[in-house]
Structures are given as C-alpha cells and as structure tokens.
Amino acid sequence: MSIYQLKQPIWIGLIWSFLYIGLESTQSVFFGSALQSLDSFLLGLLVFGVTTTLLSAGIFSFNRQQFSHAQQCLIPLIACNLSTAAGWVLYLIAIQLIEPAVAFTVSSAAMPIAAIVFAHFSIGEPEHLDTVSKRFGMVMIIFGMLFLGLTILAGYSGFVRGGFAVGLGGLLCAIGSGAGFEIAYLFQR
C-alpha cells in the first residue's frame, strides 16, 4: 500500500498532528525562552492556581454533583493529579536546565516509550509493536532522543546552565516529565 492509497481520515489525522506539533513547538520555544528569565514555579502556581480556583468555583456553582463523583473516584483522581503535577514540575525544572525546545521534545518523546514500558509491567493497556511502521516509529523516537541527549551532553546545544551533570539532570527531568504525563493519561482513562 502506497502512502497515496491511505484513507482520508488518516490524512486528516496527519494534518491535525502536524498542526499540533507546529503550534506546540512554537509555544514551547517562545514560552520556554520567556520562562528562562521568569520564575517558572511562580508562573506555574499563578496559572494553575488561578485556573483551578476559577474552575472549581464554576463547577461548584453550576454542577455540584461533580464533587460527589470526584469523591467516589478519589484514589485515581489523586493519582492523576499527583502524576500531572510531577510531570509539570519536572518539565519546569528541565526547561531551567536545558534548552526548552529539547526539553519539550524529549518529554513528548518519552510518553510513547513510557506507555510501552508501563504496558510491559501490566500497567495500562497492552501496547503492541506489531507492525513495521510502529517499530520504525519507535526506533526513530529512540534515535531522536539519543541524538538530542548526546547533543546536550556534548555541549553542542544552544543552552545548558552548566556542564555534563546539569545537562544530564535536565534530560532526566524531561524524560521523567513525559513518564509523569503518561501516568496521568493512564489514570484518567
């Protein structure tokens, strides 16, 4: 099957994926560079704190039964929130240590790898690399992460706040961020 024989829904998905990747990359580089001069934790507290407060007040005003539903699902809700918070904290640390675009890319690439690792340990749904395209895609993701990691560790990146140890710390935080977001995704299902 050639690429031109693919069905339209796949093309629509590819177009949306490219648009999403473009927008996310743009905002990551723009906001990442802006966050280099700001206290990212204070900014995160303001953004997430204000959003959480306003949304909670709105839910309390318009749909109070959501709070009782949340109490019934308390353990998965807490796990989802803690893993999301861990993902964001690790991401914010990563962009303070290494180039924001690299931190974003490594964090995003760590998510599908984490899904396969978690599935191997029976956490979440089974993930199968049963087609050539899936295996090729995973190999490309791993090679991309290795290339970016080696670029950072060798000092060829545009931004690292220290030497080898700082670069390694930033990379590990970015990988941990992706894993945290994947755990949050597993708990919200």
Image (cartoon, grey):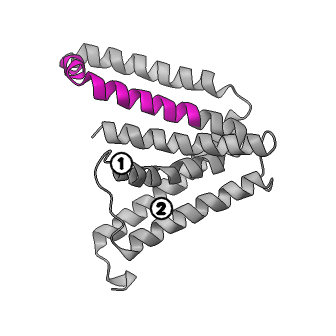
Q: Is residue 78 magenta?
A: yes
**Position in image of residue 36 (x %, y %):** 72, 35
Instruction: Determine the residue located farthest toward the front in the rendered image.
Output: 121
Give the residue displayed 70% in from the left and 45% down from the top: 168
Q: In the drawing, does residue 74 fall left or right of residue 112? A: left
Q: Nearer the viewer, residue 2 or 117?
A: 117
Q: State the count of labels.
A: 2
Look at mark 2 in the image and give the residue it sits on. 18
Look at mark 1 in the image and give the residue it sits on. 121
Q: In the drawing, does residue 128 fall left or right of residue 43? A: left
Give the residue displayed 69% in from the left and 35% down from the top: 96
Position of residue 145 relative to residue 134, above or below, is above
Q: Is residue 9 magenta?
A: no
Q: Can you tell which quarter of the image residue 90 is in? A: top right
**Position in image of residue 109 (x %, y %):** 52, 54
Q: What span is in magenta?
A: 65-90
Q: CA distance from mark 2 to mark 1?
A: 31 Å
**Position in image of residue 8 (x %, y %):** 29, 72
Amino acid type at image mark 1: Phe
